[in-house]
Amino acid sequence: MPAPATLRVVLAEDSVLLREGLAGLLARFGHEVVAAVGDAAELGETVATGRPDIVVTDVRMPPGFTDEGLRAAVELRRRHPALPILVLSQYVETTYATHLLDAGDGTGVGYLLKDRIGRVEEFIEALHRVAGGGTVVDPEVVRQLLRRRRDPLGALTPREREVLALIAEGRSNAAIAARLVVTEAAVAKHIRAILQKLDLPQADQDHRRVLAVLAYLRG
Amino acid sequence: MNVWQALGSRRFLLSGWPWRAAGYLLGAALAGALTLLAGLLLLTAGVLVVLGPAAFALLGLPVARAERRVRRLLDDRPVPDAHRPPSRPGLRAWLTVRYTEPVTWRELGHALLLALLWPFDVLAVVLAVAVPLALLATPVLLGVDGGQVNVLKAWPVTSWPPAVAVAVLAVPVFALAAYGMTVYAGARAALARTLLTGPDARITELTRSRVRLVDAFEAERARIERDLHDGAQQRLVALTMMLGLARLDAPAGPLTTRLARAQDEAERALTELRQLIRGIHPPLLTDFGLPAAVAELADRSVIPVAVDLDLPGRFPAPIESTAWFVVCEAMANVARHSGAGRATIAGGYAAGTLTVRVRDDGRGGAGPDGGTGLVRLGDRVSVVDGRLTLSSPPGGPTVLTVELPCRPLPPCA
């Protein structure tokens, strides 16, 4: 499902500083912030009326300042399974990301550390990927996941581990090739080797492959 | 040293202890007699005015004070004064506190007991002194009187040999009397102590204040974590965002490089801040509970860690955080000192106790004095009435077990 060039975004973030900043950033890249709210309860109502292409939400929000934003996101995925959601967080712990991925079929969902907003162009690209039905997981979270399962991963070469991490983050062959400064054919070769070593099905579509790898890493 | 230890000593009869016992009993008897007198006066006065019974209720205060002073003769363990200081100056505040605290009424009970027992106290001393003296005096009296002496007014003695025998008998009777009187005094002092201290008042209060202290620390940690999250962290995120936008606008050249470096620094600060926050009060523990937090901790460990935590749900925050800090400290020790290649974290809940066990296959020999923070950890565990046990024979394995009595929280929606 191709996402429109101009995204209608609902933004939920309790810090005024960040909310305004994000709204400005999105506007600058030509996206329309249809609503910017400060707590999780408002988020649910706004989504019903605003018909956004994507929801961008913080994890920790009023009233309880625990994981209200995440719970709201999980609830939204249950009610609107096709609505893409990008969760911004301060937590690298994999449990938060796992909760989000488990809430639906894992497509059109993203979990990024707030640090990544600063890498403006990459952030906007991630936003597009999620809006287009892709899966995006923060590199730091992927690193945590890679540490978890040691035995079969030990069979991978360092290069293959790098590629695996980039797949898990939700990147396409072209993006991986650009990142590692190799050809796409080389990337495709690495990916075939990885999937074979981990005994995963050879999937053609990017996002299926991402989900397979993530499911594998989460054990 | 107290009176019971003195009774066991071989030099007891030659020591000052029998005299101390006599002094204590006479002091108590005096206090008892005065209490009786004062009590009767106050109660008769109370027929006319309300103040009498009111003052009567406070009669225990001076008596208990005297008891605390006099009992030092027999017991070097002080009986703590459990009275609370009034919160405000003035007679009214003082009276309010005194009438409402249980120790006042315990002291009144003690005073009334003294008022009843004082004749026995006097009798004990008089008997212990008079009986042996009377025996000793038999030959003297026989010499003075010439005819007949009634020993203790009961046994008539008329000739010298039995009179001398009775006088010799005075020595063991003296000893027996000294022991008897001292035992009675010791028992009286123990009774007074029980009445005055109540059911381990000090220990309960101490525990309660430690629990309060730990709760306060816990709240403070949560507050610091919140402040860092809502303040510094958000500002740093905003800063990286501004730097990122500035990089977009800046013309390619040295300025972009410098902006990129500034952004790297800000990101590093964010990473460090995140680690700091995790150490202060892990949000994951609050949001998802112990198994999730422990699993993440195991993921971050440098050696493989198997986790097997089977819990029926969430537990009260102090329990979860205590268990969490035990596991953290144990894992830090495993990484730092043990030289282990593997570790397991296992735990469960049964019979009202949450048990978590961290085991490693390292070299063992860990102890509370090895700078491992185990003592501090033990203190923390004891505050929630838990138990921390360590088994670490040289050569390993090291097993650290924490047991926390608690109930799981009802599941919330």
Image: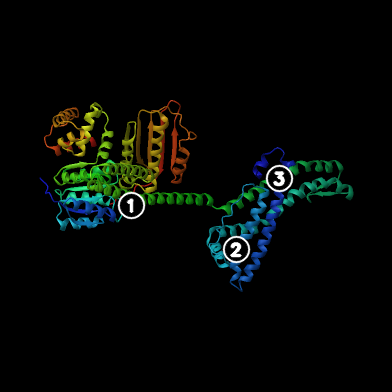
Chain letter, disc 1 residue: B
Q: Position of residue A104 (x, y in %)?
A: 18, 45
How much space separates mark 1 and mark 2, taking CA atoms? 56 Å
Residue type at tag 1: Asp
Residue type at tag 2: Leu
Q: Position of residue A91 (x, y in %)?
A: 29, 44
Position of residue A70 in the picture relative to residue B334 (left or right):
left
Compared to A130, does A11 lie above or below?
below
Residue B111: name its quadrant: bottom right
In the rendered structure, which disc, 3 or 1, sits on the residue that comes first in sequence? Answer: 3
Instruction: Please state which of residues B78 and B280 is positioned toward the viewer in this rendering.
Output: B280
The quarter of the rendered structure image containing the N terminus of chain B is top right
| Mark 3 in CB contact with mark 2 (< 8 angstroms) | no
Residue type at tag 3: Trp
Crowding near pointer 1: few (<14 within 10 Å), some, many (20+)?
Answer: some
Chain letter, disc 2 residue: B
Residue placed under numbered mark 1 in the picture: B230
Please say whether residue B284 is visible from this viewpoint. yes
Crowding near pointer 2: few (<14 within 10 Å), some, many (20+)?
Answer: some
How much space separates mark 3 and mark 1, taking CA atoms? 69 Å
Residue placed under numbered mark 3 in the picture: B17
